[in-house]
Image (spheres, coloured by chain):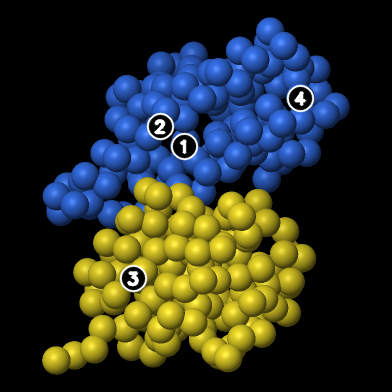
Chain colours: A yellow, B blue
Amino acid sequence: MTHKIDILLAEDDRQIARLVEFKLSREGFNVVIAQNGKEAIDLLGVRLWSLIILDVMMPICDGWEVLRTLRASLQPHIPVLMLTAKSYQQKDISNAAELGATEFLRKPFDPNDLASHVKRLVGI
Amino acid sequence: MMTDWESDPILKALRNEFIDSLNARFQKLKKIELEISSLGVTEERLYSCQMIAHNIAGSAETYGFPVLTQVAAHLEDFLEYFSKQTPIVETLKFIGFFGDTLDSASKSRLDPIQILEEDQMKELIFVVGFLPD
């Protein structure tokens, strides 16, 4: 039995979260959705994630805080794909790079592009 | 962005769910617009409008509504950077225009570019074009 690759998706926009989950599960991934930054932090240690996808702007705590917590944890090397708004400035991108984000994808994104990013980041 | 929304019943249902959500956001925007008109502008009310625009800007094009994303993104930028030095009547006009665009998309289930009349297109081009990228 082939073990599915586990992906944690932190995204508060329900419509986007469900579309990403649908697209990636059709590609063979197992996607767990966190609806805000706190849920994402609570889920960090629950299993060994192959990839974490983080929306930046989320309620309770944002994607930057989740990223900071992850990099300070026992699993600091998990690849992280940040979903950033088009309006974000270069300094925000630089900040994310300093915090250890692996890649960025600007919203709105094409679901096919997202799937390509994900496959590359998990090495398939 | 090329997603064939008719190719899969789940994709089609997800898109329909997104379109259905536009009406709720339109109603919320209308409520804030009314509050601003009758009770005055507050940072909280403008921020609420900004967040509605932010969410639409980040998702509409993904669901096949590129013009809706453009209008929302411009409103978001306007509210963040320009609204403080703009007369409130102009801010309300922009918010109202965005609300009408949401309402049109919600009812027609199409991106505004596909359903606007010529004079509405001119207004859209003016609104979308007058702010720098």
Q: Which callout, 3 or 2, points to the residue nearer the camera?
A: 3
Eyeballing the image, is A59 above or below B43?
below
Seen at 34% across and 40% down, the residue is B18
**How far is mark 3 from mark 4, CA to CA?**
40 Å
Q: Which mark is residue A31?
A: 3
Q: Which residue is mark 1?
A: B67
Q: Which mark is residue B22?
A: 2
Residue in front for this viewpoint, A116 or B19: B19
Q: Which callout, 2 or 1, points to the residue nearer the camera?
A: 2
Q: Residues within 10 Å of mark 2 (few under 14, many from 20)?
A: many
Seen at 63% across and 59% down, the residue is A61
The chain ID associated with circle 3 is A
Q: Is residue B5 visible?
A: no
- Kind of residue at badge 3: Val
- Kind of residue at badge 2: Leu
Badge 2 vs badge 4, beta-carbon distance below 8 Å = no
Q: Which mark is residue B42?
A: 4
What SS does tag 2 mark?
helix
Badge 2 vs badge 1, beta-carbon distance below 8 Å = no
**How far is mark 3 from mark 2, CA to CA?**
26 Å
Residue A78 x, y percent position in the rendering: 51, 86
